[in-house]
Image (cartoon, grey):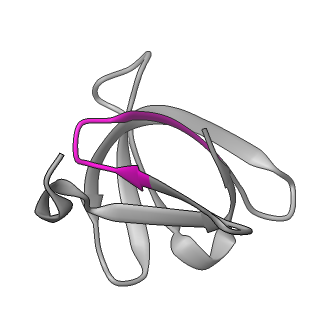
């Protein structure tokens, strides 16, 4: 994979996880540990946008600062 294909790089300790658009992710976010599963559609400076796995008409923007876990 070309480095230019990556749109999101998540770090945990010394490890880096790289994601490109279209990747299916489960994101845990916020104080209540809410979760959203979907396809990565957009990454901006301060948020990511996913389109729902179960409902393709449902999209969710999540602030990067609120993300606790990406799997």
**Quadrant of the rendered structure where residue 58 is?**
top left
The percent position of residue 56, horizontal first and vertical second, equals 29, 24
- Image-quadrant location for residue 61: bottom left
- Does residue 12 appear left or right of residue 4 in this picture? right
Magenta-drawn stretch contains 36? no
Is residue 25 rendered magenta in the image? yes
Residue 25 rendering spot, x and y as whole percentages:
48, 36
Q: From the image, which quarter does the C terminus lie in?
A: top right
Residue drawn at (67%, 68%) of the image:
14
**Rendered view: 18 above or below 12:** above
Q: Which residue lies furthest to the top in this view?
A: 54
| 52 relative position to 36: left or right | left
Q: In which quarter of the image is residue 42?
A: bottom left
Q: How many labels does the image show?
A: 0
> Horizontal and vertical percent for residue 41?
24, 48
Write the residue at 36% across / 49% down: 19
Residue 67: x and y, percent?
65, 63
Q: Which is nearer the eye, 11 or 27? A: 11
Q: Which residue is drawn at 25% across and 58% down?
A: 6
Magenta stretch in the rendered image: 18-27
> On the rendered image, what quadrant is the N terminus found in?
top left
Would you place residue 71 above or below residue 54 in this image? below
Q: In this view, does 65 lie to the left or right of 63?
A: right
Left or right, 6 with respect to 68, comes to left
- Of the pair 1 and 43, the residue shown nearer to us: 1
* Residue 25 in the image: above or below residue 40: above
Q: Which residue is drawn at 15% across and 55% down?
A: 5
- Determine the residue located farthest toward the bottom in the rendered image: 45
Q: Is the magenta stretch mostly helix, strand or loop?
A: strand
């Amino acid at each position: 994979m070309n480095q230019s294909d990556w749109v999101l790089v998540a770090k945990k300790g010394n490890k880096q996880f790289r994601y490109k658009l279209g990747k299916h992710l489960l994101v845990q976010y916020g104080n209540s540990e809410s979760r959203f599963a979907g396809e990565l559609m957009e990454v901006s400076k301060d948020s990511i946008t996913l389109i729902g796995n179960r409902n393709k008409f449902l999209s969710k923007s999540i602030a990067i600062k609120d993300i606790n876990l990406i799997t």
